[in-house]
Amino acid sequence: MTIAREWWKNATVYQIWPASYKDSNGDGVGDIPGIISTLDYLKDLGVDVIWCSPMYDSPQDDMGYDISDYEKVYPEYGTNEDMQTLIDETHKRGMKLILDLVINHTSSEHVWFKESRSSKTNSKRDWYIWKPPKFDADGNRHPPNNWGSFFSGSAWEYDELTGEYYLRLFARTQPDLNWENEVTRKAIYDSAMKFWLDRGIDGFRIDTAGLYSKDQKFPDASIVCPDEEFQMSFQNTNNGPRIHEFHKEMYSNVTSNYDAMTVGEVGFCSREDSLKYVSAKEQEMNMIFLFDTITVGREGGDTFGYKDWTLTDFKRAIQKDTTFIEGTDAWSTVFIENHDQPRSVTRFGGIKYASQSAKLITLLESTLTGTLFIYQGQEIGMENLPRSWSIDEYKDINTINYYKKFKEKYGNDSDFKEKEEKLMDIINLVARDNSRSPVQWNSSTNGGFTSGTPWTRVNDNYRTINVASQIDDPNSVLSFWKKSIQIRKQYQDLLIFGTFKILDFENENVFTYIKEDEKNGLRKAYVVLNFSNNSVKFEKLIGGEFELLHCNVGDVDESILSPYEGRLYIVD
Ligand code: NOJ
């Protein structure tokens, strides 16, 4: 099938998480003028689209994913005028700008919620999801059902004022909007979407795009974690009964009128369900983020559940996330980092071979089919926080809530210290805080992120890992990224649009795959990636003329792959 090649398909998208990107005024918090000052750097890297994570007014309980005013910029980040300058300056350089669209919930400080909460008869009462308590035989009050929050505890919050609970799948200050109400949906489209599209933005990354349609019977979720009082509610809240109707409405009422790019965070989805969101003929979203790859080794249901991973698990996940569109009119994404994930070099690479494995992951990412997303700092191989840091350095509500609950549960155990160390190992490996430390621009104090006191600690390794030290070094991770993006574009028929086939699947050290162009089946891209600490034998698994196009080591020994060595061949 020939698929249309809209502008967002071969784009390289760069995600900016404003608080930790670049501070221009010394208050310790990244800001919009700081972003503007780096636009030439991004253009030079090869970025086509900037995705700016929430920059809206917010109490910042969940770092801006708790929005109190869609139409106003968070004052510490700047003003609406600064945003307009960012839009214009981005466009001047031939790049586009998309924003985060957080519309499953607002902050409890949003005026809509304040009204909704004020009385049972308020005209906005039904804009959020309110339910009466349940009482047991002894008259004790309980939440309406057993749904758990993604951030620990119940997903329901009791509000004394009117004696009812509101649903909040995330923090207690993030009440879920009621998408069943048509008036609410219209207000969301106008305030959160059209307001910014009319100012020139080019689309949205749509937060929690699978969660808007809840099972209206609000049944108890099935018990997956028997030790826990509250259970994940996925089967009752994710990909719910009206979700596609809502996305179709959003498309026809809003995004289709602006040629907007849309990428939805959906997470977990079968092939069939994924295609309902992103098949072009469905007219919903352009593409989605699936989580199979980034959650390899994680245990479902427990935020900090971790059981380690194998290379074949990783291959299987990548296969699922990239091939579900083959033979269809749908499109997909390529990403391995974002503000909710740890640094890929620590999580999937070998930290002993940090620079080499950062480049190996770059080779992987830049040769997979779909729109490519890079997260700030990934281009210089930023790493997770040092293991020696204590829990006090962690700022994310998700980490903090989990740790508190853990301490409540095990704090008096004689082996608490041991248990705590184990938990800290996992937190240090997978917590969201790992990607939220400030971008390391140079080797000056605080990595050049701020001239003041940073709101969160800069990774101690900023003196060696930073943009300034890499920018003119042809062997740096940054230069490797730049070259990889160029090659990706140059060979886009194979690398961006090609089909994907894994060879020697069972190999636990080496990941080999070929990319083919359906229209020109003779020429192939052949990618071989050694994901191990050992040197391994290299054998060509297909016939043909091999031309080495790109590689992450200086001296290539044809027959041996050194630890974390990766190569891209063109085979004719
Ligand atoms: C997904 C976002 O990526 C995450 O950072 C946020 O905490 C939740 N949605 C809630 O908005």
Image (cartoon, grey):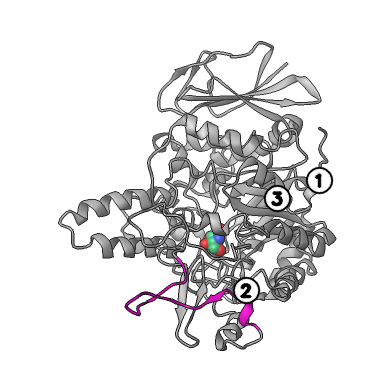
Q: Amino acid at mark 3?
A: Tyr
Nearest the eye: 38 or 501: 501
Counting labels gives 3
Query: Which is in the foreground here, disc 3 or disc 1?
Result: 3
> Which SS class for mark 1?
loop
**Circle 2 residue:** 78
Q: Which mark is residue 277?
A: 3
**Circle 1 residue:** 6
Nearest the eye: 377 or 165: 165
Q: Amino acid at mark 2?
A: Gly
Q: Say which label, 3 or 1, has the lower sequence index.
A: 1
- Quadrant for the N terminus in the image: top right
Segment colored magenta: 124-145
Q: Is residue 277 visible?
A: yes
Q: Amino acid at mark 1?
A: Glu
Query: Which is in the foreground here, disc 1 or disc 2?
Result: 1
Find out whether the residues at labels 3 and 1 contact each other: C-beta distance under 8 Å: no
Q: Which residue is rendered at x = 54% and y = 38% of the image?
A: 476
Residue 495 at x, y = what percent? Answer: 70, 32
* Magenta-colored stretch includes residue 142: yes
Residue 107 at x, y = what percent? Answer: 56, 74
Q: Quadrant of residue 261?
A: bottom right
Q: Residues within 10 Å of mark 2 (few under 14, many from 20)?
A: some
Q: Is residue 396 visible?
A: no
Q: Which mark is residue 502?
A: none
Q: Residues within 10 Å of mark 1 (few under 14, many from 20)?
A: few
* Magenta-colored stretch includes residue 422: no
